[in-house]
Amino acid sequence: MSSASDPSPAAASAAASAAASAAASAAASAASNPESQATAEQKQSAEALSEVQEYLDVNQQRRRVLPRAVLVGVSAGCVAVLFRLLLAEADALRNALIGWSRQAPAIGWLAAMLFSAAGAGVSVLLLQQFAPETRGSGIPHLKGVLSRLREMCWRRVLPVKLIGGVLALGSGLALGREGPTVQMGGAIGDAIARGLKAAPRERLTLTAAGAGAGLAAAFNAPLSGVIFVLEEMQRDFRPIVFGAAFISAVVADIVSRLVSGQGPVFAAPAYAMAPLSSLPAFVVLGVAAGILGVAFNRSLLKMGDWVGRWPRRRKLAMRITAMVAPEASHSLSMLRHGCQAEGD
């Protein structure tokens, strides 16, 4: 005995008849309107061709950019190694001068001070006269280039950053080589892209890849270079950007390790594992460090704005400061220019 929910033969026959009628109606409509059917087929064909063309374009772009990324990595690694070697020689010269000054205390202190003042003064002079965009770390300018807000003139950025960085750091100023190496790597990427007549978008990709390669070669840290490009510089996670940044960073790291060795740049000693009971103390430490970091960054930017509002007499004041305390003079100059670039 069939249940009440089972369809009756009459209902099934009616449903089949309705479906057949709908199909016949659709066929008749298509037969009566061949232009609509042809338009649908053309639309499907155009979509298929568009997908195929997009696939071919991506493959062609990959074939162009990735080999160039290898060249960018080799070049950025060589420049980073050269920068590191020149800084080592400058440090050795400064230490030798300090050792000699101890043997002649009457005038030795003056020689050491003049050495630092000369290095800082020439560095600032190069920056102001030839490449103002190299002020500060150079990273704000590079971010402006990748955002299409600034122009990259690698012919003046590369030599001024290299020579000025060696003079500033070699004279004993408390600066780091991360920013200069990143900007020089970006300039190398731009130079190679322009030399090979790359498209504007590909040129930005190679510029960002060069920046990551510079960071990777500076600290023997290829993964840091890749993450730096993706999260900080370009903020673009397209496969072509990731591939170019990864290849350039790895190649630059290999070049750096071939010259400087396999050891890490910052060697940390082995410490005993902290007990679980100390985790709350680490939470407090992290919160305190975050608060101090925000306060430091904001005070640094405000100080830069304050220095930027000085009258024209600030040049005379900075020259006097350079004779008395060259490190303070160079730091103020970098602070003023770098913070203005951040504000831009």
Image: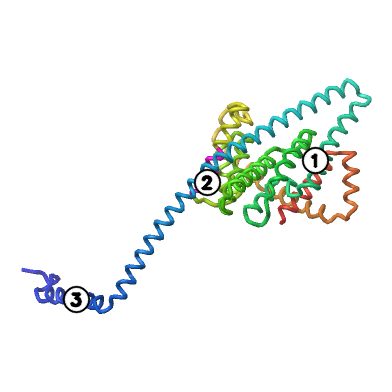
Type of residue at label 3?
A: Ala
- Looking at the image, is mark 1 or mark 3 earlier in the sequence? 3
Q: CA distance from mark 3 to mark 2?
A: 55 Å
> Front-most of 160 and 91?
160
Q: Would residue 341 be counted in the magenta stretch?
A: no
- Looking at the image, is mark 1 or mark 2 earlier in the sequence? 2
Classed neighbour count for the residue bearing mark 2: other residues with Cα under 10 Å, few (<14), some (14–19), many (≥20) = many
Type of residue at label 2?
A: Val
Q: Which residues are magenta?
A: 239-249
Secondary element type, mark 3? helix
- Residue at the image position 83 percent from the left and 40 percent from the top: 122
Labels 1 & 3 near each other (Cβ < 8 A): no
Give the colour scheme shown: rainbow
**On the image, numbered disc 1 is attached to which residue?**
123
Does any portion of residue 161 appear in the rendered image? yes
Q: Residue 333 location in percent, x, y? A: 81, 46
Residue 67 vertical placement versus 339 (above, below):
above
**On the image, numbered disc 3 is attached to which residue?**
24
Q: Would residue 244 be counted in the magenta stretch?
A: yes
Secondary element type, mark 2? helix
| Side of 113 where 186 appears, left or right | left
Type of residue at label 1?
A: Ser
Residue 117 location, quadrant? top right
Secondary element type, mark 1? helix
| Side of 24 where 229 appears, left or right | right
Residue 17 vertical placement versus 333 (above, below):
below
**On the image, numbered disc 2 is attached to which residue?**
65
Q: CA distance from mark 1 to mark 2?
A: 35 Å
